[in-house]
Amino acid sequence: MRLLPLIGATYFMVAGGPYGLEDIIGDAGYGRALLLLLLVPLVWSLPTALMVGELASALPEEGGYYVWVRRALGPFWGFQEAWLSLAASVFDMAIYPVLFVLYLSRIAPALTAGPRGTLWALAVVLLCTGWNLRGAKSVGQGSVGMFVVLLAPFAVLIAAGFWQGLAGHAPVMALLHAPVAAPSFAGAVSVALWNYMGWDNASTVAQEVESPQRNYPRAMLISAALVALTYILPLAAVAVAGIPAGQFSTGAWTDAARTIGGPAFGTALAFAVVLGGMLNGAGMFNALMLSYARVPYALAKDGLLPRWLTRTTSRQVPWASVLVCALAWALALRLSFERLISIDLVLYGGSLLLEFVALVALRLREPSLPRPFRIPGGLGAAIAAGAGPTLLIAFALYAARDERVGPLSALAFAAIVSAAGPLAWLLISIVTRRSSTKSAGDAEP
């Protein structure tokens, strides 16, 4: 992948358009939602993008964040990094085919009724699997194309919203401060973090990126700016257009487009937004499959998973790992994890904190490691970079204290999943040791 496809893939690994912001507006109102979307990139996205830029340029290896943590903290913590990321992917990846079906149902509800919805979600998994088997370059180039198509209706919505609001002299300040019926600022913060997370995912395909030392820092910073702009501008446009914040919940962009478009082209704009929502689900699943499938491959190369997972195509695509991941995510489609953002945040937050620890550990242990891009400001700046994300993850844990997964709290459920990581490491260590002993015994004359 060159720079532009890397930016496209990174954008879909993190955002995939303004879809998903609706609950932030509905929970916090326009004023607080805009404040969150302005501040979270500075405290969460920018430090993470800088960290990824430094580590990906210093260690541009397949497996990305797993390789960084393993080198900085040792094999045990490297495995925990991979475990947390793959566990989070089960909850995360179940969301996107469901989003595809959700938006498809707004066009043709009969097509998604009953078990047909699951079949459409499975079709998304199969399509993205085939696309991924074509290689990182194909996924990156496809992401650029989907970026343009997906955001085209929002460009119209933004222009029409601002024109309608300014021409009609909408009471913008009153709308920004208008309360919502059931405010939940903590919930809005969690959804904002979820919408801004995933910057490290692009790191796992480093060996499939042209000039990674130069392109990763550029891709991170450009993508961070694009994500913030494509979140803030649509939200500001619907606020200026005078649409009440209380009307927003998942999928409400369609209704906003119909209202702003009016009798002239409201139906056409709403239809285009729905198609964009379908692209959002498929595009994010496709790009994230590219990322996550490289982690089992890297683990297998280190002998921590079966060696057959290292098998690749002629284009160096780890096809065995891609297929195993696709099967796991397909089995998770019926688990309705789309509301369990808190679990996703806890697991992802744990892996992200390990990456910031690895950043500082490598600065201390390997000061002479070539770093084509370095977070400016010395060791203190590297330590400070992790402060904002750490505080936000702590807040997300506090906000999730009342979430439930059956009889368990979401935090207890996430803790059990996390605690299974060391047990998996112990089991793998025992199996590997026995395998090595048996091989050594067979080799003796």
Image: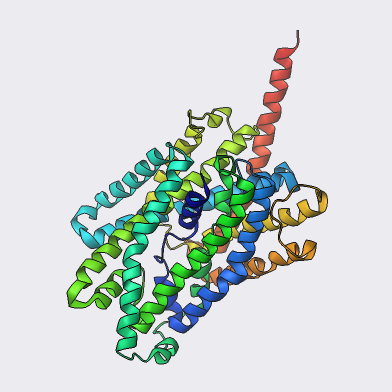
Horizontal arrangement in the rendering, residue 302 relative to residue 73 (left or right): left
- Residue plotted at (72% across, 22% down): 437
The residue located at (41%, 66%) in the rendering is: 18
List x then y, in percent, for residue 279: 34, 55
What residue is rendered at 73% in x and 63% in y?
376
Q: Position of residue 223 (x, y in %)?
A: 52, 60
Please say whether residue 186 is visible from this viewpoint. Answer: no
Q: Does 264 sit above or below residue 109? A: below
How many circles with numbers are drawn on the protein? 0
Residues 157 and 94: in front is 157
Q: Is residue 113 left or right of residue 53?
A: left
The extreme top residue here reads 445
In this picture, is 44 found above or below 301? below
Against 83, residue 159 (above or below) is below
User: What colour scheme has been applied to the protein in the rendered image?
Assistant: rainbow
Q: Give the quarter of the image for residue 146.
A: bottom left
The answer to whether 195 appears left or right of 257 in the picture is right
Quadrant assignment for the C terminus:
top right
Residue 116 in sight here: yes
Return the x and y of residue 278 as percentages of the image width and height. 32, 56
**Residue at horizontal 82 percent and vertical 50 percent from the top:** 365
Question: Where is residue 179 drawn, in percent x and y?
Answer: 42, 88
Quadrant in the picture for residue 263: bottom left
Tell which of 83 and 5 is nearer to you.
5
Task: Return the residue nearer the eye: 333 or 60.
Answer: 60
Q: Is residue 180 above or below residue 332?
A: below
